[in-house]
Each structure stands twice: as C-alpha cells, then as structure tokens.
Image (cartoon, rainbow, N blue to C red):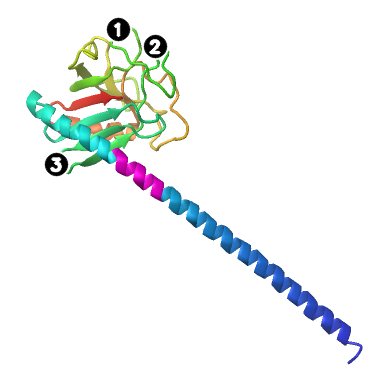
Amino acid sequence: MKTYFPIIAAILLFTGFVSFICYKSNNKSTKQTEGAEIIESSESKQKKEERKKLYARLKAKADEAKVYSKQQGLSSKHCILIDFSIHSGKNRFFVWDFAKDSIKYESLCCHGYGQKSTQSKPVFSNVEGSYSSSLGKYKTGARSYSTWGINVHYKLHGLEKTNNNAFKRIIVLHSHNPVANKEVYPKHLPLGWSQGCPVINNEIMRKCDALLKESKKPLLLWIYN
C-alpha cells in the first residue's frame, strides 16, 4: 500500500490541478461571453436610438412632402426622400409610404463627384457640366433605357431654382452594379459613380421601377442636406 501511496497522491494532485485549470478557463470564457453580450446589447440599443432619430427626421420631411405633393398634383401614396447629410456608407435614399407613415424601401445613394466633392462631403451645384448633385424638390418623369445597373432610369424634373437645370443636365434616377445592397459604414461610397444623379443599388431600383410603373402620378423626389 505504501508503494502505491505516492502514485495515488500524484494522481489526485494532477486531477485537482486539471479541474482548477478547467474551472479558470470556463470562468474566463463565461466572463468573455457576458462581456460580449453587454457590448452587443449596448450596440443594439445605440442602433435603436439612431433609427428612432432617423425616423423622426424622415417623418418631419414626409409630412411636408405630403402637403407639397397634394398641392402639385403628385402622388399621394409615396414620395422619395434623399438625405445627403447622412454618412454615404449608410442608407440615405428612402421611399416613404404616406398611408403607413413608414419607410417602404431604403438604399445607399451616391452623390456627384464634381465641384471638389469628397466621399464624406458633397458640394452641390445646379450648373451644367458641374457633375454635382443638386438640392431641392424634383418630380419623376419618363422611364427610359439606362446603360447602368438594371438598364432602367427615370428622368427627373427640378422644381426649384436650386435644381431647375436637372433635365438639361440629364440628372436621372438609376442604379449601378457596384452599389452594395447593405450599408458599408464606417466606409464611404467611392466617388465617381455619380455625375450628379441619385444612384442606388439594383435591388431597390427594381422595386422602385415596379412602384413607379404602377403609379398614375409622378412622385416627389426630394434631395436635402
């Protein structure tokens, strides 16, 4: 028995050591999991707050758009809102449903590269050849062939002094294959995909195409900053 005692003691000691290591490892893993869950919960809460603020801003614009659309004989069902104050890596093109007071579709949206615009800051212009986006209200026009995206574009007619050259400048709503279907934040969209046109992803352009073809009246498209 004395012969085996050191062996038994060594086995018990080793077993205890292994158990301790496993406990420490499991405890560390549990803490890491709890920490990750806290971070995820915090990020989720932040996103909800951002979404809430976004909705409030859009709702305020949509309320104005609804009144304007009625006055101008435009669609009373939907409008398109483009907020170029939003980071270009986030969705900033929104189709708004007046009846439901909600976002129907949303997409990333490119701004023009002209007038020393940067990826993070568009410079606006209504001048022909400026290759810049123009602020203001537009109405959608004729559906035509496009060499870009889903091969469809919609003419845009500027309704204000800030964008009344839009039709002459061939500013149209269209899509482009490289525009992602999901947000790319914190990255910005590259410059060079727009010469002043609002350019969106193919998936949302297909949905907009169906909606615009079905609409009996032009839609208000409002670009603001």
Q: Quadrant of the C terminus?
A: top left
Residue at 27% over, 19% down: 135
* Residue at 30%, 29% in the rendered image: 83
Image location of residue 103, percent across then percent down: 25, 40
Image quarter for residue 164? Answer: top left
Magenta residues?
Answer: 45-54
Looking at numbered disc 2 in the image, what kind of residue is underneath it? Gln
Label whose residue precedes the other's in the sequence (2 or 3): 3
Q: Secondary structure at mark 2?
A: loop
**Residue pointed to by mark 3:** 99
Instruction: Say which quarter of the image contains residue 25.
Output: bottom right
Most common SS among magenta residues: helix
38 within the magenta span: no
Residue 131 in the image: above or below residue 76: above
Gap between marks 2 and 3, in whole Å? Answer: 39 Å
Residue 191 picture location, percent across and down: 43, 20
Residue 45 in the figure: left or right of residue 142 = right
Q: Residue 5, image x and y in percent?
A: 87, 87
Which mark sits nearer the N-terminus, 3 or 1?
Answer: 3
Quote the CA–CA distance across marks 1 and 2: 12 Å
Residue at label 2? 115
Residue 51 as seen in the image, left or right of residue 220: right
Left or right position of 44 against 98: right
Residue bearing mark 1: 128
Label 2 close to label 3 by CB (< 8 Å) = no
- Taking depth in this image into account, of 47 and 12 the one nearest to the observer is 47
